[in-house]
Amino acid sequence: MSLPPFHLAFPVHDLVQARAFYGGVMGCEEGRSSDEWIDFNFHGHQIVAHLSPTRSGDAATNHVDGHGVPVPHFGLVLTMKDWEALAKRLREANTDFVIEPTVRFKDKPGEQATMFLRDPSGNALEFKAFADPDQLFAT
């Protein structure tokens, strides 16, 4: 499946911390930047951290498979190999997970590995991988 890259702009309270997290911990290549924003290559997608000291973080949680999932959140669907490598990288960086790397919907349609974490501004991110990638939109 070939998809066009998406663009997502989101608020952060500190660009130095955003650069350290997205560039350093997450390994995203940095693109253009200014004193108010930074572009990052998020696995081929363009995400932009915009300085907004009073507008970051989530506002609510919804229960999914026994976990309180932060709303809003964004992230990626990775291959299982890439998901496992990222989970290892994040654990080695002593990441404080909102939801530890786990398998959701075990033995059901849409079984998936998932993990949630926050960036330094409190924005929630989810990374997931499917046991069967064709089950991405399973009901």
Image (tube, grey):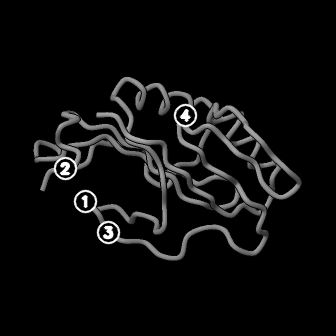
Q: Quadrant of the N terminus?
A: top left
Label located before the other in sequence (1 or 2): 1
Q: Amino acid at mark 4?
A: Arg
Q: Secondary structure at mark 1?
A: loop
Q: CA distance from mark 3 to mark 4?
A: 24 Å
Q: Is residue 101 visible?
A: no
Residue 94 at x, y percent in the picture = 62, 38
109 to the left or right of 12: left
Q: Is residue 8 visible?
A: yes
Q: CA distance from mark 3 to mark 2?
A: 13 Å
Q: Residue 118 is drawn in which quadrant?
A: bottom right
According to the image, label 1 marks what residue? 65
Looking at the image, how many numbered discs can be counted on the residues? 4
According to the image, label 3 marks what residue? 63
According to the image, label 2 marks what residue? 105
Q: CA distance from mark 1 to mark 2?
A: 7 Å
According to the image, label 4 marks what residue? 91
Q: Secondary structure at mark 2?
A: loop
Q: CA distance from mark 2 to mark 4?
A: 23 Å
Label located before the other in sequence (4 or 1): 1
Q: Residues within 10 Å of mark 2 (few under 14, many from 20)?
A: few
Is 10 or 82 nearer to us in this picture?
A: 10
Q: Extreme right residue here?
A: 35
Cβ atoms under marks 1 and 2 closer than 8 Å = yes
